[in-house]
Image (cartoon, grey):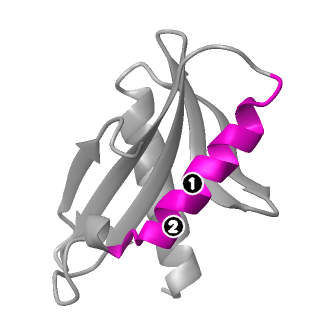
Amino acid sequence: MSEKNFGDFGERIAEKYLTQRSHVVIKKNYRTRYGEVDLICTKDDVTIFVEVKTRRSGLFGYPEDAISKKKMRRLVVTATHYMVNRYGPWQIDVLAIMMSRDGRVDIRHFPNCIY
């Protein structure tokens, strides 16, 4: 499986995880000239921007460790761009997905983790 396909697979796992927890996915792969956010959801009148990181092993650290300060800034700018003509609270979540060779999936959800 290519890295792109693997990332897309992780995003589908994330979408299922979130919808099972009452999130409504309203956009996927929202792109601006400032950056991209993997999923945009709503839950309890809060707009939630979700960055999904998926890894096959811990060889290079946990999935959430791959989010650099530059990526954090781009997420905030992209979310702000999306919210320009919208009102209400919003937050940025990270979903870290670790998949083992035997098919087990470990999901760690970090809500409202980037300010």
Q: Contact (CB < 8 A) between labels 1 and 2?
A: yes
Instruction: Give the residue at x 70% y 15%.
Output: 87
Mark identifier at residue 5: none
Residue 31, image x, y percentages: 76, 57
**Does the magenta portion include 32?**
no
Can you say whether 32 is above or below 47 in the image? below
Q: Which residue is mark 1?
A: 75
Mark identifier at residue 71: 2
Residue 115, image x, y percentages: 42, 42
**Does the magenta portion include 67?**
yes
What separation in Å lies between label 1 and label 2 (alpha carbons)? Answer: 6 Å
Can you say whether 28 is above or below 45 in the image? below
Q: Main secondary structure of the magenta part?
A: helix
**Horizontal placement of 102 versus 24: left or right?**
left
Q: Nearer the viewer, residue 91 or 43?
A: 91
Residue stretch rendered in magenta on the structure: 66-85
Instruction: Give the residue at x 16% y 75%.
Output: 102
Q: Amino acid at mark 1?
A: Leu
| Helix, strand or loop status at disc 1 | helix
How busy is the neighbourhood of tag 1: few (under 14 within 10 Å), some, or many (20 plus)?
A: many
Q: Amino acid at mark 2?
A: Lys
Q: Nearer the viewer, residue 70 or 98?
A: 70
**Horizontal placement of 71 versus 21: left or right?**
right
How busy is the neighbourhood of tag 2: few (under 14 within 10 Å), some, or many (20 plus)?
A: some
- In this view, which residue lies farthest toward the top? 44
Instruction: Give the residue at x 21% y 50%.
Output: 108
Residue 32, image x, y percentages: 80, 57
Can you say whether 22 is above or below 74 in the image? above
